[in-house]
Image: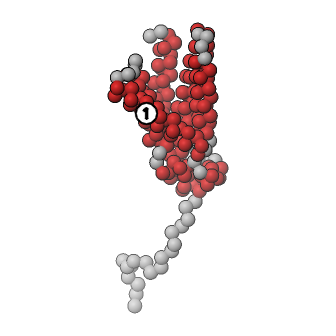
Amino acid sequence: MEDNPYAAPRETSPAPLLSDEVIRHEHLKHEAAVRGAGSLYFLGGILLLFLAVAMGFTSGGGQQWFLAIAAILLFWIALQLRKLKPAGRIAAMALSGFAVVLALGQLLTGMTGSPPLSVAVLVIHGYILLALSPPKNSFVCSPRYWEIVAATPHIKCRTPLVVVILVSLLLFGLVMLLLGF
């Protein structure tokens, strides 16, 4: 009896194990989102530090110290996110959640002096929460994924377009602020 060329194969082989490269490619967008959130926190730290220095020259109060400490906290969170550490992810989610609640509260109660600023805070921190909350992002911040990143140095992640746009808008706003517009 001859074999039927249209019949299903008789032998089934087990599914191949996922290699490090396949896992890295599957999680590359999530890695970029976490690192992009780190970039946004780094930019926020720069802005707070700039504000603290500017306040230090014009007033004698202790507000500049609070801003400087907040800037250091943002730099630490940014560094942890860029290194894909879980502590940075947790701290960023907590801080962004708090910022979203504050911005929503200000917008809903009308207690804000600058509604566009509250909307900007809401959009930026809402994006950060969405970028850090998917389940794959907890794997991206795990020691197993760090091993995969070390094993695949030839695979690079790119910064998401949303982060590039937000950073560009923030830098444009800072330049406009400095020029007095």
Residue drawn at (50%, 51%) of the image: 136
Is residue 120 positioned above or below 159 on the image? above
Residue 4 screen position, x and y as percent: 38, 82
Identify the residue at horizontal 48%, vertical 51% (top origin): 135
Element at label 1: helix
One can see residue 144 in this view: yes
Q: Is residue 81 left or right of residue 121?
A: right
In percent of width and height, residue 21 lies at 57, 54
As displayed, is residue 86 above or below residue 117? below
Q: Residues within 10 Å of mark 1 (few under 14, many from 20)?
A: many
Q: Residue at x 51, y 12 (%)?
A: 178
User: Callout 1, which amino acid?
Assistant: Val
Q: Image point 37% across, 79% down: which residue? A: 7
Residue 36 in view, yes or no: no
On screen, 3 above or below 75? below
Direction from residue 2 to residue 36 in the image, left or right: right
> Is 30 displayed left or right of 52 in the figure?
left
Q: How is the image coloured?
A: secondary structure
Q: Which quadrant: the C terminus?
A: top left
Quadrant where the N terminus is found in the figure: bottom left
| Rendered location of residue 141, percent (x, y) | 57, 48
Quickly name the residue at label 1. 100
Residue that protrudes farthest toward the bottom in the picture: 1
Q: Position of residue 156 (x, y in %)?
A: 58, 44
Q: Nearer the viewer, residue 73 or 159?
A: 73
